[in-house]
Each structure stands twice: as structure tokens, then as C-alpha cells.
Image: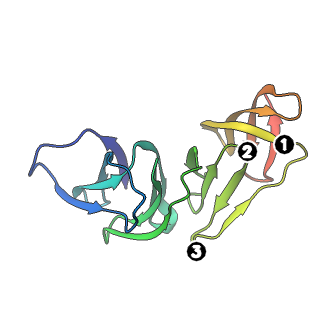
Amino acid sequence: MKAEFIYQPTSGQYEEKTFDLNSSRKSQIWSWVKFTINNGIEWVGVFRGEQKCIAIADKINQVATLTSDGLYILNIDKREILFFDQQTELKDLAEIPSKDKFIVADYDQIGIIDENFKKEFLNFEFGIENIEFGEYNGNKLKINFEKLPDYDIINGFLNTENWKIEKE
């Protein structure tokens, strides 16, 4: 299973499905994501909002797409939205190494979304802001953030086994 943001494809190049919002508050910007399911079939999903991130949770057969208009979680085999959160405060998104949950960040919190779309925010010993995810090193997610109250810039890791922040 693969997913990647692409530029608007040529008409007819891929089978497309548009995931529009049933809301009066929606942007005029669109993002295109090319999905490749396990049997090799490719198709394109069209989403409202400017592209931000994609994460794949293979173990639960879900793909999360974050745009400026919201978070979409799909079953790409069935080409259907399983969950949509019009919470546009989310800034970053990743899957956890066990590939059965998603991790999200807004401006000052990090949260976990499970396969039933329950979002639980993590509690740390200090406040954080301006969170950015990096790459994984084993079970540790590289994160950069500002530590409150002094706004010290911290480069560290989030250990996804105990959900603690470790300094680099």
C-alpha cells in the first residue's frame, strides 16, 4: 500500500474519486493523492485543502491525508472515507512504527488516533509549541519543538514505546 501527493493528473490518466466537504467553510484549493493498493492498482483521491502530510497504517488498512481543510482517514481498497475531522489546527501527521495508529500534532499538543478514530493527547512534564515531526529512528520519532515557558528550541525524539520525549 502506497500513497503520495501528486500534481493534478491529466484527465483520464487515473481513475479519480473526489472527497468533497459537506460544509459551507471549505477552501478552493485541491490536493491530489495517488494511491497504490496491494494488488498494484493505482487511483487518485482528490481532497479539499492544501496538502500537508500523508501517513499509512498498513496493519489496520488505513491511510490518513492531512490538508489545510482537515484530516481524512480512508480505506483505500474500498475508496471510502472512514473518518473526517475538520480540525484544521493539525500541523503534522505520521504513523507509529507498529503501523496500527496515527500520531498528530497541532501547535501545542501531540496526540494519538487509534483504529476507531479516538484521539488521545499525550501529557508531558513541560509545555511544548511549534511541533514538527521528522523521520523515525527505530521506535523513536524525531521531533523539533519549543519548550515552554522559555521557548527553548529542542531537537529530540518521541519514544513511541513509552511516549516520553528524549533529548538528542
Viewer-nearest residue: 29 or 92: 29
Does the CB distance between marks 2 and 1 fall below 8 Å?
yes
Q: Say whether residue 17 is left or right of residue 166.
A: left
Distance CA(mark 3)–CA(mark 2): 24 Å
Residue corresponding to mark 1:
127
User: Could you say where residue 138 lies in the image, as x and y percent from the top left?
Assistant: 66, 41
Viewer-nearest residue: 141 or 132: 132
Question: Element under label 2?
Answer: loop
**Considering only vertical position in the picture, is 156 above or below 79?**
above
Q: Amino acid at mark 2?
A: Asp
Pointer 1 local density, CA inside 10 Å: few below 14, some 14–19, many at least 20: some
Residue corresponding to mark 2:
108
Distance CA(mark 1)–CA(mark 3): 28 Å
User: Could you say where residue 79 lies in the image, as x and y percent from the top left?
Assistant: 31, 68
Frontmost of labels 3 and 2 is 2
Viewer-nearest residue: 26 or 4: 26
Q: Say whether residue 73 is left or right of residue 96.
A: left
Q: Amino acid at mark 1?
A: Gly
Residue corresponding to mark 3:
116
Upstream in sequence: badge 1 or badge 3 = 3
